[in-house]
Amino acid sequence: MLSAQIDLREMDAIIKEVKAGILKLMELSGGMQCVDRNCERILAGIKMLEINVSDLQDVME
Amino acid sequence: MEIKNIDRYWNPVLETLPREQLRAMQFNKFKRIVEWGYNNSKMYRRIYDAAGFQPGDVKNWDDIYTVPTLQKEDYRSAQAKDPWPYGDSLCVPLEKVTEYHQTSGTTGQPVYQPDTWQDWEWWNESWAYILWSQGFRNTDRVFIPFGYNIFVAYWAGHYACEKVGCEVVPGGILNTEERLLKIQELKATALMATPTYVLSMADTCRRVLGKEASELTVRRILCAGEPGASIPTTKKRMEEAWGAKVFDHVGATEIGAWAYECSFQPGGMHANEALFLVELVDIDTGKPIEELNRPGKIVITAFDRFAQPCIRFDSKDVSMWGEPCACGRSFRLLKGGVHGRVDHITKVKGVLFSPISVEEVVRGMPQFGDEYELVVSKKGDVDVITLKVELLPQAGVTPEEVQPELERQLRLKTNLAYKIEFHPFGSLPRYEIKAKRFKDLRQHG
């Protein structure tokens, strides 16, 4: 049986930082498709992190 | 916070969240998707306006039941117009859509299903919950013996395998023998298929390769598309034929993969209540059912699918709530999985009849082959159920010897009498994907 200490709040803060970084990258891309399309894919992955971690914040407090 | 059994769950926090907190999260997400649908889809706006409903009306849990349910027909009538072909059901600009799938259209015009890349990632996430709970890991080599096409079946399973870290072998257009040879050559450890095809592959393995499927290396099988993996006798046949653990799951094109059997094999499936609101409602009145062991139909909302949202969709699947599972998940258990569809559960001679009960009996008697067929017809004013079965050649018994026991078990299980027909082994239809073993001829005169 594996157990672990986790900090959802800290994880959520990092998810927000990563998302902000990707959105900033899209702002800076000047429309470079190789940046924008890969950022879109990363954002979809970040959304899954939000579903699995960030959306829990409201009910855990 | 300390999380125990962290390796048992895909999301150890969400899957074990106390019910009260889970409900609070579900309520927040339900309100969000209702607002999204109303604000972005002409279809939802039309349906809600016609019912005098506004998203702001959802103020507490019971208000959820006042939100109009969505029928497959609603999608059909909203589609086949611009933005082509999704029409009024689409909630995002067409250029955001990256995935196309459609329903099979067995009950009418197929429903078109658009997904954005984020929606598709979500589909795969819902499958990742399933795979992880059934023990799929990065050490598995998963063979998918399925003709990938416009239907969603196993596409998400494929992508979710990648997400979980499995190595995926797409068994696309190979025939059954070629697939078995490839499984043997690559030493695949897991498989995904319909129960009908799992049994058919085992039969081909015996007849063509001259060996039992259990002699191959597959030790885990994930089923979909039919209820067989939740029927104990059919599950047992598959597990014995392959020497593997067999698990069930359920999903639909318009909904997502919304329930799964975990590795504890509790005789049912967990509703994935992190991603879906799964309601059980009375078939006639639509009133919510909370008590255990009372059949009802499933109404589902997907919380995080946005291109074509699925809000209080009438799935027409029938199930019942069961006792909690020992695995520790707080997600409720649907006892016996999906028992069938509302339109398949019918009255015969005044008795509620589910064809699945017959499968449980036939597959539970070792003298019979895997195939059977059920036909309900009318003789005058009387309903007649004909059950066609095949005796296994190696069973070494005559029809006269097994018929009384078959009739006795059928009566015990279904409270009905049957006209039994014995057919030569190998003569009943064989199916590659989904079987059509039940025919109700009464509706056609």
Image (cartoon, coloured by chain):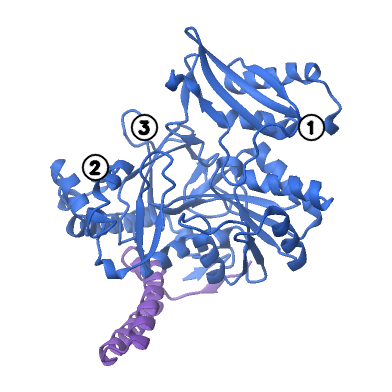
Chain colours: A purple, B blue
Disc assigned to residue B68: 2
Q: Is residue B157 above or below residue B335?
A: below
Q: Name the residue beneath numbered marker 1.
A: B392
Q: Name the residue beneath numbered marker 3.
A: B282
In space, the residues marked 3 and 1 are separated at their CA atoms by: 41 Å
Regarding residue B59, the answer to whether it shows in the image is: no
In space, the residues marked 2 and 1 are separated at their CA atoms by: 51 Å
Q: Is residue B78 above or below residue B405?
A: below
Check the residue under mark 1 and report the chain it is in. Answer: B
User: Residue sitting at 35 percent across and 87 percent down?
Assistant: A35
- Mark found first going from the N terminus, 3 or 2: 2
Quarter of image, res B228? top right
- Three-letter code, disc 2: Pro
- Three-letter code, disc 3: Asp
- Three-letter code, disc 1: Leu
User: Residue sitting at 37 percent across and 57 percent down?
Assistant: B21
Disc assigned to residue B2: none
The reply to the same-chain question for discs 3 and 2 is yes
Q: Is residue B349 above or below residue B368?
A: above
Q: Are marks 2 and 1 in contact (CB under 8 Å)?
A: no
The reply to the same-chain question for discs 3 and 1 is yes
Instruction: Give the total number of marks visible in the rendering.
Output: 3
- Mark found first going from the N terminus, 3 or 1: 3
